């Protein structure tokens, strides 16, 4: 599925003097390097061309091993990043280890776990804060899909101004997987088949996420579990650590404004899940979380007639038109946080 499913570190940051810059008519693209565990990771920054200090947004993308460089014009992340830059924001994305020009362990190796993903984002944020074109008091996280499950740890360590949690979850990964399996199965199959599917998913996911058995061993023991322990190209260690997260306990530690978004054509999560996350955050930090719903938007921030239609398009490697209203509302929320008193 599209970039989604179905802590003491040694870290130092170094901005190398050799800086590659590309220009388009209305913004600049900069390439800088950060160092994590003695390996160099590439960051990609977009910035307005006018001199000055600007608010900044770090993108934390969804599940998978892929490069964030040379985004196609119709890529949803390109729309978000470049759209925000044209509206006066610096943006950054950090290439995952082993992807693009980033070093480090292969993205799908056991060493590529959640802890390393968090270190990547922290390194990028530190570089942003040290940049002379960034307002260090107005740095935000934009995290999509599984990204907020990484970002919640990042925001505990780095003082971000606010956090956008787009198309994500509020409950634990194990519970979410079962709900997601039922939701998507019912789009194509009757209730009795959905029940059978969820029971199998529960059995397989328990061995993977709770007992911490490696996927290949689970499939060897129970071939029917193959689809339910599919790591979608990332490391099994990453997903097993995701499965251990107590989301409520982690969000309780983050006291910043949060915008939670959900599109009505997104079959990978639900309005209930997003409202749960908003209610959870506000129970700990009253008034900090807000919810925005986008009619006809799918998980890829693209327009689709329905959740089923979105899934069918993804299976054909297709996607809809980017939801421009999503960008407008995200930019409006970010600008409102920049203008708010600190």
Image (spheres, helix red, strand yellow):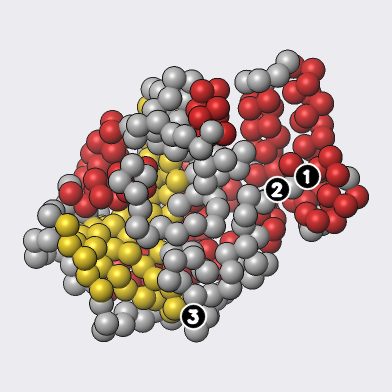
SS state under label 1: helix
- Mark 3 Cα-neighbour bin, 10 Å: few <14, some 14–19, many ≥20: few
Do the CB atoms of the residues marked 1 and 2 lie less than 8 Å apart? yes
Regarding residue 115, the answer to whether it shows in the image is: no
Left/right placement of residue 162 relative to residue 241 reads left
Q: Quadrant of the C terminus?
A: bottom left
Left/right placement of residue 235 relative to residue 222 reads left
- Mark 1 Cα-neighbour bin, 10 Å: few <14, some 14–19, many ≥20: some
SS state under label 3: strand
Name, please, the residue furthest toward the front.
316
Q: 22 or 263: nearer the eye?
A: 22
Residue 39 badge: 3
Do the CB atoms of the residues marked 2 and 3 lie less than 8 Å apart? no
Residue 230 badge: 2
- Picture residue at 78% right of the left edge, 51% below the top: 208
Q: How far is the residue under mark 2 from the one under mark 3?
A: 28 Å
Left/right placement of residue 201 relative to residue 90 reads right
Left/right placement of residue 234 relative to residue 302 reads right
Regarding residue 112, the answer to whether it shows in the image is: yes
SS state under label 2: loop
Q: Position of residue 56 (x, y in %)?
A: 26, 58
Q: Is residue 77 above or below residue 235?
A: above
Q: How far is the residue under mark 1 from the one under mark 3?
A: 34 Å
- Picture residue at 68% right of the left edge, 61% below the top: 237
Give the quadrant of residue 135: bottom left
Sequence-first tag of 2 and 3: 3
- Picture residue at 62% right of the left edge, 20% below the top: 187
Q: How far is the residue under mark 1 from the one under mark 2?
A: 6 Å
Q: Position of residue 129 (x, y in %)?
A: 29, 69
Residue located beneath label 1 in the image? 226
Residue 301 badge: none
Q: 250 or 185: nearer the eye?
A: 185
């Amino acid at each position: 599925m599209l970039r989604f499913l179905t802590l003491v570190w040694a870290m130092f940051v170094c901005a190398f003097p050799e800086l590659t810059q590309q220009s388009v008519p209305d913004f600049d693209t900069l390439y800088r390097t950060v160092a994590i565990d003695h390996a160099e990771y590439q960051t990609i920054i977009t910035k307005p061309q006018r001199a000055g200090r600007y608010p900044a947004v770090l993108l934390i993308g969804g599940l998978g091993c892929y490069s964030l460089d040379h985004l196609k014009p119709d890529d949803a992340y390109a729309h978000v990043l470049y759209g925000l830059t044209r509206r006066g924001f610096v943006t950054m994305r950090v290439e995952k280890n082993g992807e693009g020009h980033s070093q480090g362990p292969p993205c799908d190796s056991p060493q590529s776990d959640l802890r390393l993903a968090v270190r990547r984002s922290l390194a990028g944020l530190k570089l942003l804060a040290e940049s002379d074109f960034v307002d260090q008091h107005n740095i935000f996280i934009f995290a999509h899909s599984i990204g907020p499950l990484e970002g919640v740890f990042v925001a505990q360590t780095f003082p971000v101004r606010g956090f956008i949690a787009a198309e994500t979850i509020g409950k634990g990964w194990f519970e979410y997987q079962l709900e997601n399996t039922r939701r998507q199965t019912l789009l194509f199959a009757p209730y009795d088949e959905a029940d059978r599917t969820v029971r199998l998913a529960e059995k397989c996911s328990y061995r993977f996420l709770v007992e911490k058995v490696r996927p290949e061993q689970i499939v060897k023991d129970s071939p029917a579990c193959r689809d339910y322990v599919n790591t979608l190209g990332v490391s099994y260690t990453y997903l097993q650590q995701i499965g251990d997260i107590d989301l409520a306990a982690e969000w309780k530690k983050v006291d910043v404004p949060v915008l939670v978004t959900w599109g009505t054509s997104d079959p990978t999560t639900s309005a209930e899940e997003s409202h749960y996350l908003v209610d959870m955050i506000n129970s700990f930090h009253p008034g900090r979380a807000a919810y925005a719903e986008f009619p006809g938007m799918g998980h890829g921030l693209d327009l689709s007639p329905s959740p089923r239609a979105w899934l069918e398009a993804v299976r054909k490697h297709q996607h809809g038109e980017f939801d421009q209203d999503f960008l407008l509302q995200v930019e409006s929320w970010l600008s409102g946080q920049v203008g708010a008193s600190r």
